[in-house]
Amino acid sequence: MISINEITRIFDKKEVIINEKETLLNYHLKIKSESPFRNYEEVISLLEHIPVRDIWSLKVNFSYDVSCCLKRGNDYSLFIIEVVQNNDCFSDGEEIEIEIDITKNFEGNQLSIYNFEIVKDFLFNKNYSDFLELFCNLRKEHDFIHFICLNNDVELKTSFIFISNKDFSDNSSEFNFRDQLEKRDQICNINWKEYINLCPNDLAITNYKNIDDKTLDYLKTIKLFLSIISIADFSTLENNLLKINIYGFRMIEFEIDLSKNILVNDEFSRIFEWLYFDGNIFDKSQIVRNILTLHCRYIDILQIDKTVLDSIKSNYKLYLKENVDRYIEVTNQISIYLNQTSDSIAEMTHSFTTKFKNNLLLFLTFFFTTMIMGTISAGKIENIFNNDIAYIVYAFLILSFIYLIISILDYRQNKKRLFRKFDRNKNFYKEFIDESDIDRLYKETYNLDIEIEEMNSFVLRYSIFWFFSIITILAVVYYFNGVAY
């Protein structure tokens, strides 16, 4: 770790003029002295403590055309020899300039800050448009940035930036900013020269130490701006002037000059969190905009209070209740239809068995009538069958077999019709309820495959019984007909 203060303390403050400049990627220190530069070894020793990710250079100007330069990795001995030689030529009234330049580089997500007070002025005295442009570009490369303060005991933590004098920080975030941006882009239109890839939570301060109120207010204003554009229908940012349009029960337009001492209203942050962290973004955004346009009929949008979010939540509960009532109505309709489907399957099974019973009853009636009438006329049972009656029975059995085939085909056709109707009904309700919810309702409430499988098994048993009944009757008739002759 390097302390710039230690370098400046090497020089007598009465004899030197110190000038510092720093941006995010560069640091420049200039020291003007009217005494020979004899502290070069101490300065070089301190420069060696600069983090290896940064590149430093030391330059000593003895006059407009005489200077000695040293860069990290160069041979220090040659530089010292040159400085000593030029010090020997130093005369009273001359002025020596010592310049230290540091080019800062990212190491992962870490970046050095050598004088936080200077960087703070560089960052937080910008207009808001320039600040956003800078950090939107940083966001393209980094999910978060750790600014390591090498000379200041400060701390400022958000989900995106962490400024501290600690060497490491775990800046894990509980929210997915990409998911928030995707939702925002679906419901909001933002007109600016860059794509704003920052969310309000990115600059929501979670912890700070030794940070002045002006800096905190600046970040709060940025957070307010990001919250508003994530709620409004249309937003335009020109330097520090924010223009917004919100369409709800009515249309409202506002202009907010961010450069003025505006009221930093946390209600927008709370509305943003309620809007983006749960539920359907489209439904919730419309409710938010409806309530905002009603509340802002006679007041400035920045003057809203907690009653706005309370009203939004109440309206959303009413909206959900209406949806719940509709949901219950639809699920009841599904339940009724599934019960009807079960009844249809039972009716198909009953229809098949009825056909079998009617067929069997008709034949038995004919058979026993033939036996009784034949016995009465012939006087004995072995003479009840003749060829004519046997042929009629054979014809009846053939028709019964054909009727069995027709009944099976009719059952299969009805089953296909039932499946088509079932799928058509299921697809119809997908327009009102989420597809996964429909699948859950149908599977938990009713299992068509099981019912069909049971019906298939039932029809198969009756078909086999029907078929063997025909074979049995055919064998009996054939036997008695043979005995008669």
Image (spheres, grey):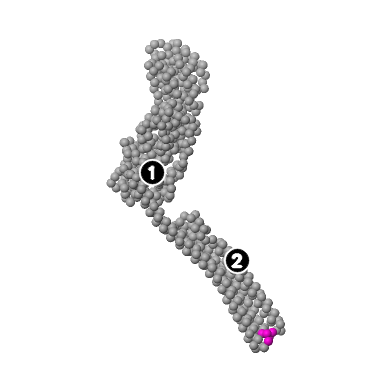
Q: Looking at the image, which is closer to me, 420 or 320?
A: 320
Relative side of 12 to 469, left or right: left
The mark closer to the camera, 1 or 2, is: 1
SS for tag 1? helix
| 33 left or right, relative to 389 | left
Q: Compare residues 322 and 131 and report the one nearer the observer.
A: 322
Image-quadrant location for residue 98: top left
On screen, 453 above or below 131? below
Residue with the mark numbered 1? 270
Q: Residue at x 70, y 79 (%)?
A: 479
Q: Which three-letter amino acid code belongs to the residue tagged 1?
A: Arg
Which mark sits nearer the N-terminus, 1 or 2? 1
Location of residue 250 in the rendering, given as x and y in whole percent from the top left corner: 32, 50
Residue 379 position in % (x across, y down):
67, 88
Predominant secondary structure, magenta span: helix
Q: Is residue 295 above or below residue 260?
A: below
In this rendering, does residue 48 appear at all?
Answer: yes
Instruction: Name the residue that disc number 2 marks.
Output: 457
Q: Quadrant of the C terminus?
A: bottom right
Secondary structure of residue under mark 2? helix
Which one is in front, 10 or 57?
A: 10
Q: Does 362 sit left or right of 335 as displayed?
A: right
In percent of the image, x 36 and y 33: which residue is there?
A: 213
Q: Please provide the residue range marked out in magenta.
A: 380-384
Tell me if residue 472 is in the magenta stretch.
no
